[in-house]
Amino acid sequence: MCGITGYIGEGESASILSTGLKNLEYRGYDSAGIALVGDQVDVHKQEGTIDGLTIPRDVDATHGIGHTRWSTHGEPTDENAHPHTDCRGDVAVVHNGIISNYTELKEELAGHIFESETDTEVIPHLIENEIARGADLRAAVTRVLDHLEGSFAIAATHVDHDGIVAARQDSPLVIGHGDDGMYLGSDVTAFVEYTRQVSYLEDGDVAHLSEDGITIFNDGKRVEREIQTVDWDASAAGKAGHDHYMHKEIHEQPHALRQAISGRIDELSGKASLDIDLDDEFLESIDNIQIVACGTSYHAGLYAKELIEPLVDVTVRVDLASEYEVYDGYDTQNTLVVAVTQSGETADTLSAIRRAKAPGMTTLAVTNTVGSTITREVDDSLFIKAGPEIGVAATKTFVSQVTALALFATYIGRLRGTLSADEGADILENIRKLPNAVQSVLDAEPQIERLAERYVDSDAFFFIGRGLAQPVALESALKLKEISYAHAEGFAAGELKHGPLALVTENTPVLAFLNESASPDETFNNVKEVESRGAPVICLSSTSEDASFCDHSIDVPNLGRLGPLVSNVAMQLFAYHVANEMERPIDKPRNLAKSVTVE
Ligand code: F6R
């Protein structure tokens, strides 16, 4: 949702904070601001992206906090931008999340001067009251937390009090331990240029970052949080010569896949080895898997269902996390609940996992983010190892999620004896070939770019596929709509004739997935249905036979059950080039943020 930065130390606060905000911009870009604290609190904030924010370099500040916003309460305006201050301008606060009882708190703060429509603004005024009662900044923030309901991460400063006080409740905050000072961020990206030594705050933690170091309290008691070294450096978070992060991340997929697969395949025995601790006996005993996820991760879950059910004798249900309910009488003992989430911070997914845990179900996270909230709440985590993804549209993490889930399917299939050694070896061989297959599609970028140029002005785009290719059709449509704002929809190919066919005209290209593992003959009948209505058809296929019947054909290697996943990469490029032709802000689509930490 929003991004928080903080710094205290010998370095130049203004420049460190603005680098942090730039790095966190993918979390929100409606407005940005910083508060620099020295002899006074200097607040600079405004609507729009961080590029538009003028931050003076000559302020003599010892520390400061910053924020990049994705609006929830109140429109993106200068007034609603963070940091927010108290009546005297002594306290400055940045906040990520939602204070659900802010209306009541605002009423209790009658007499205070409010300047914004945000829920956040109650916090500096509550701190102001506590400081007036004699509390120091840490005590003031701790007392204020007792009044706040909702989910939040906050950072606060006061002109007369040393340092920054940060607190988290259901919203991420990470501390960076540098040589020249202490850093604060909503995630590691905020300060990875400066330090890779990090500790993750836990719910209820109140951290005081001062010139003497850091002290953390939880429930009134002093606690220590382990210092870990993150295994990627600043260059992994840069654009490396690409115009957009999304383009870079699409091209990083062969590498990301090698990381996801590395050390996890034993083709000889047809077994996958996964670095998870879930008990084999439990995995052998389960009857159900429930997958909960949102957006692109939900599509990865749908793909996983198509992979797991034929290989393992379990029923797989895939739920949008925001719709997930556990009903009475559900078999909680023999069910594994799998949360698929790139960030590990999505509020809807976290809330679904909490609902699953309440009656005692075993939970597993499939995630990219070590140290994320979900990893601390589930019984076990399977990491997809895709490296940092900055572009708001998920690309490499989708492909890596599906790959990790394919390994998981092979692992439990072999464990339960539902998958023979030969079948297991076949799947693993295709997984091993994935990075090169993806590279061959990336090499076809000039052809895909030409198709994007040709069809950019279409009225709408429809993606059709069956079985394993149906989630890929949904994902391809989501990618195109979120970054280009074009009307795009994905359909189960057989459903076209039951309604959506009415939308098809000569100005609505249809992109058809004819992968061999996804009932190509049946989908081909649907291609003919749309062709006879005049729609141009772009096929994704591994047989040249199909090519002659389609208006255009993109060659995709035949990779068994993973073929549609490779087709998805071609559609990422298609979406990218359509959006690029339209000159859209590809890495920061309107109204969206990378990590959605509100329900
Ligand atoms: C779309 C996209 C979103 C996310 C969704 C879940 O490109 O990125 O749909 O997939 O917000 O996010 P995670 O995977 O972090 O839980």
Image (spheres, helix red, strand yellow):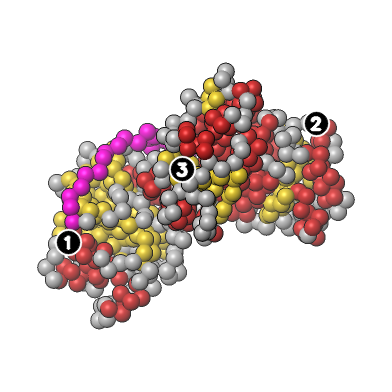
Q: Position of residue 493 (x, y in %)?
A: 76, 48
Which residue is at 15% across, 56% downward? 162
Q: Earlier in the sequence, mark 3 or mark 1?
A: 1
User: Is ligand 1 closer than 8 angstroms to the Cβ of mark 2?
Assistant: no
User: Is ligand 1 closer than 8 angstroms to the Cβ of mark 3?
Assistant: no
* Amino acid type at image mark 1: Ala
Q: Position of residue 590 (x, y in %)?
A: 53, 58
Q: Which portion, as a residue range, is magenta?
A: 220-246
Residue placed farthest to the right in the image? 532
Residue placed farthest to the front in the image? 329
Q: Earlier in the sequence, mark 3 or mark 2?
A: 3
* 233 is within the stretch colored magenta: yes
Circle number at residue 139:
1
Give the alpha-carbon distance from disc 3 to disc 2, as whole Å. 41 Å
* Amino acid type at image mark 3: Leu
Is residue 117 found left or right of 402 in the rendered image? left
* 518 is within the stretch colored magenta: no
Q: Position of residue 488 (x, y in %)?
A: 68, 54
Is residue 172 found left or right of 448 in the rendered image? left
Q: Which residue is mark 2?
A: 544
Which quadrant of the figure contains the N terminus?
bottom left
For residue 88, which quarter of the picture? Answer: bottom left
Is residue 317 found left or right of 15 in the rendered image? right
Q: Is residue 437 above or below residue 81?
A: above
Quick one: SS at disc 3?
Answer: strand
Q: Which residue is mark 3?
A: 364
Mark 3 and mark 1 residues within 8 Å of each other at the beta carbon: no
